[in-house]
Image (spheres, helix red, strand yellow):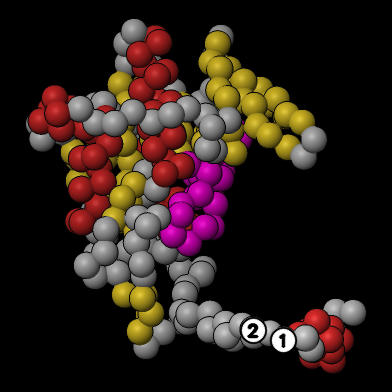
Amino acid sequence: MKVAVLIKYCPDSEAVIEVADGKLVTSGIKFSVSPYDEYASEEALRIVEAKGSGEVVLFNVGPERNIKGIKDELARGAHRAVHVVTDGEETDPARVAAMLAAAIRQENPDIILCGWKGIDYDCGLTGTMVAELLGIPHVAIVTKLELADGKAVCRRQVDGGEEIIEVKLPAVIAAQKGLNEPRYPSLKGIMAAKKKPVKTIKPAELGIELPPKGAEYLSFERPPSKQAGKKFEGPEAASEVVRLLREEARVI
């Protein structure tokens, strides 16, 4: 079985990102694969291991720096990767999805896994768009996945219970936290990753016409600073708090 995994390399969840002149300052900060994509990658490895044969192929769109994230996932056990190398970061999900779909068509996988969203821009659109472009089913926020007889049975949490969805393969399955516990790369895996093939493609080589940018981030700014709190002491503290709640906060 061939399992495709879409991964995004973005600022680490613990990175402190500054804003200057309306732009994000990402130089010097740590990048990593989006955690939800790590769940997808781990699930892909488990599928292949359970089958006893097959391969996990990673797909990524982005600048050359993304090779670090690709190597990290190869070290966990993925077999090879396809990297669509862009001049800079692509932030429009429609353009990213178009490139991913074109690259995936060349591989014809049995199932496609991805995280249900990236942790940078929180769009949660790329997986759905890839499925639409490929003309296959899509299920998002999946916390349990079972494969049998050319079908995928997906479970996900909803208000007050659990939803069970069955789709025919191939399909795009978007992982949520709880699907599994991603493994750590071993020293052997890290060394092996250096020799695993990474196919690099330029967008112009995909044989498609990219859609124009439908969404563009014009400016960023930090949220306004919170006002300092007030401290009340003395016998009049309670009455003063009540007065401010009534006259300033207007909550009573």
Q: Which numbered marker is on residue 224?
A: none
Q: Position of residue 27 (x, y in %)?
A: 24, 70
Residue appearing at x 40%, y 10% in the figure: 50
Horizontal relation, residue 211 to residue 155: left or right: left
Q: Where are the magenta residues, as a range?
A: 115-139
Q: Answer whether residue 236 is magenta in the image.
A: no
How far separated are the C-alphas under marks 2 and 1? 10 Å
Residue appearing at x 51%, y 69% in the figure: 215
Whether residue 10 is visible: no
| Image quarter of the N terminus | top left
Quick check: 186 above or below 29?
above
Residue appearing at x 34%, y 47% in the figure: 33
Circle 2 is placed at which residue position? Answer: 231
Q: Quadrant of residue 12?
A: bottom left
| Image quarter of the C terminus | bottom right
| Residue type, numbered disc 2 | Lys
Q: Quadrant of residue 104?
A: top left
Circle 1 is placed at which residue position? Answer: 234
State the SS at label 2.
Answer: loop
| Residue type, numbered disc 1 | Gly
Quick check: 147 above or below 248?
above
Label 1 crowd bin: few (<14), some (14–19), many (20+), radius 10 Å: few
Between 245 and 111, the residue placed more toward the observer is: 245
Between 15 and 120, the residue placed more toward the observer is: 15
State the SS at label 1.
Answer: loop
Discs 2/1, front: 1
Q: Answer whether residue 131 is magenta in the image.
A: yes
